[in-house]
Image (cartoon, helix red, strand yellow):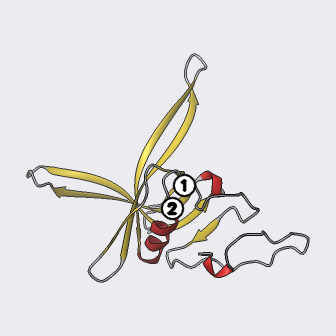
């Protein structure tokens, strides 16, 4: 018999800067609030937007990367699983929470779109992919006709 599937894919924008904390063992735990917006037409043909807010949690190396490079307004692709928790609050009332536990993340957009950095726009890769191991995938060689971007920082400063 097949097991169930718990998979969530979100593309949205951060509503605030990431919050990173560390466990006693030193593992990073980063939380973000991610907004996704869908558009549909109502009966009268008017466009209606609906924004959903998602609580996303990154652990370990992925949490360190998210905490360091994501900022409010950044557009990000997140893959993970949904987790429901029930706990008792300080007032003794049972409370519920729903989180997305991320195991994949891609920073989308350029520098001017909240994707990190500031200043002049220069040609650069549009996505940086990180998996649960926090490692960037191996890079493919750039086509010979493509010019290397001119930036005022060393390659060693690039996180991917």
CA separation in Å, label 1 and label 2 = 6 Å
Left/right placement of residue 13 relative to residue 6 reads right
Please tell me whether mark 2 sits on a helix, a strand or a loop: loop
Instruction: Determine the image quadrant of residue 59.
Output: bottom left
Q: Position of residue 139 (x, y in %)?
A: 71, 78
Above or below, comparing residue 125 to residue 24 in the picture: above
Quadrant containing the C terminus is: bottom right
- Label 2 crowd bin: few (<14), some (14–19), many (20+), radius 10 Å: many
For the point 58% across and 64% down, the residue is 106
Above or below, comparing residue 151 to residue 38 in the picture: below
Q: Which residue is mark 1?
A: 74
Quadrant containing the N terminus is: bottom left
For the point 11% across and 55% down, the residue is 90
Q: Are marks 1 and 2 in contact (CB under 8 Å)?
A: yes
Residue at the outermost left position? 92
Q: How many marks?
A: 2
Q: Which residue is mark 2?
A: 70
The answer to whether residue 2 shows anywhere in this view is: no
For the point 80% across and 79% down, the residue is 141
Q: Nearer the viewer, residue 4 or 131?
A: 131
Q: Position of residue 48 (x, y in %)?
A: 54, 27
Q: Nearer the viewer, residue 133 or 43?
A: 133
Residue at the outermost right position? 145
Q: Which mark is residue 116?
A: none
Left/right placement of residue 102 relative to residue 151 reads left
């Amino acid at each position: 018999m097949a097991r169930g599937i718990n998979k969530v894919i979100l593309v949205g924008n951060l509503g605030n800067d990431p919050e990173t904390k560390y466990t006693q063992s030193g593992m990073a735990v980063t939380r973000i609030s991610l907004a996704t917006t869908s558009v549909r037409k109502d009966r009268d043909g008017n466009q209606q937007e609906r924004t959903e807010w998602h609580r996303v949690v990154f652990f370990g190396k992925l949490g360190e990367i998210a905490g360091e490079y994501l900022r409010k307004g950044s557009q990000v692709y997140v893959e993970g699983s949904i987790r429901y928790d029930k706990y008792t609050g300080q007032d003794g009332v049972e409370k519920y929470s729903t989180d997305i536990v991320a195991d994949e993340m891609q920073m989308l957009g350029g520098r001017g779109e909240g994707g990190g950095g500031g200043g002049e726009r220069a040609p650069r890769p549009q996505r940086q992919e990180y998996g649960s191991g926090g490692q960037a995938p191996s890079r493919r060689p750039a086509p010979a006709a493509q010019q290397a971007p001119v930036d005022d920082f060393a390659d060693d400063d690039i996180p991917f």
